[in-house]
Image (cartoon, grey):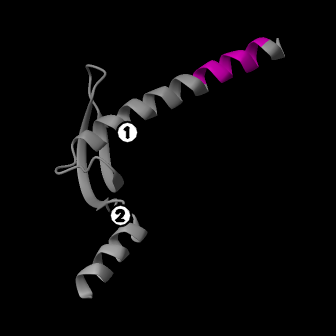
């Protein structure tokens, strides 16, 4: 009986994890001006609805865009050439 119960618990945990990932995606999609790369910090209230969906209220959001990748060697050498 223990093996069966632990298998059921594992399945429930995996299902809950999948639901949380889907919910996270829904919340993040609501953030305006979402960068293609960066970091999003959110504080939200989530209200389950009777039709198995959620109403999401974002309370706070902070979006930090990842800086563009610049190769220092190329940039530095061009600046030196311009200064000479």
Picture quadrant where residue 84 is located: bottom left
Specify few, some or many for label 1: CA neighbours under 10 Å numbering under 14, 14-19, or 20 or more: few
Task: Report, in whole angstroms, how far the alpha carbon at label 1 lies from the one at label 2.
Answer: 31 Å
Task: Provide the residue span drawn in magenta.
Answer: 4-12
Magenta region, mostly helix, strand or loop?
helix
Q: Where is 9 relative to 41, above or below? A: above
Residue in the foreground of this view, choosing between 53 and 39: 39
Image coordinates for residue 27, horizontal then vertical, percent:
29, 41
User: Given the current orientation, which residue lies at the most extreme right position?
Assistant: 2
Image coordinates for residue 78, horizontal then vertical, percent:
30, 74
User: In screen coordinates, is 54 left or right of 71?
Assistant: left
Picture quadrant where residue 42 is located: bottom left
- Which label sits in the foreground, 1 or 2? 2
> On residue 70, which mark appears?
2
Label 2 sits on a secondary structure element that is loop
Q: Which residue is at 36% across, 60% downward?
A: 69
Label 1 sits on a secondary structure element that is helix
Pointer 1 or 2: first along the chain: 1
Q: Which residue is mark 1?
A: 24
Q: Which residue is at 36% across, 76% downward?
A: 76
Image coordinates for residue 82, horizontal then vertical, percent:
23, 81
Specify few, some or many for label 2: CA neighbours under 10 Å numbering under 14, 14-19, or 20 or more: few
């Amino acid at each position: 009986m223990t093996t069966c119960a632990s298998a059921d618990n594992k399945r429930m945990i995996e299902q809950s994890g999948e639901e949380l990932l889907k919910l996270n995606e829904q919340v993040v999609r609501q953030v305006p001006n979402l960068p293609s790369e960066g970091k999003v910090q959110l504080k939200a209230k989530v209200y389950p609805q009777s039709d198995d969906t959620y109403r999401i209220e974002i309370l706070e959001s902070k979006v930090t865009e990842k800086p563009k990748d610049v190769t220092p060697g190329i940039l530095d050498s061009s600046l030196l050439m311009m200064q000479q």
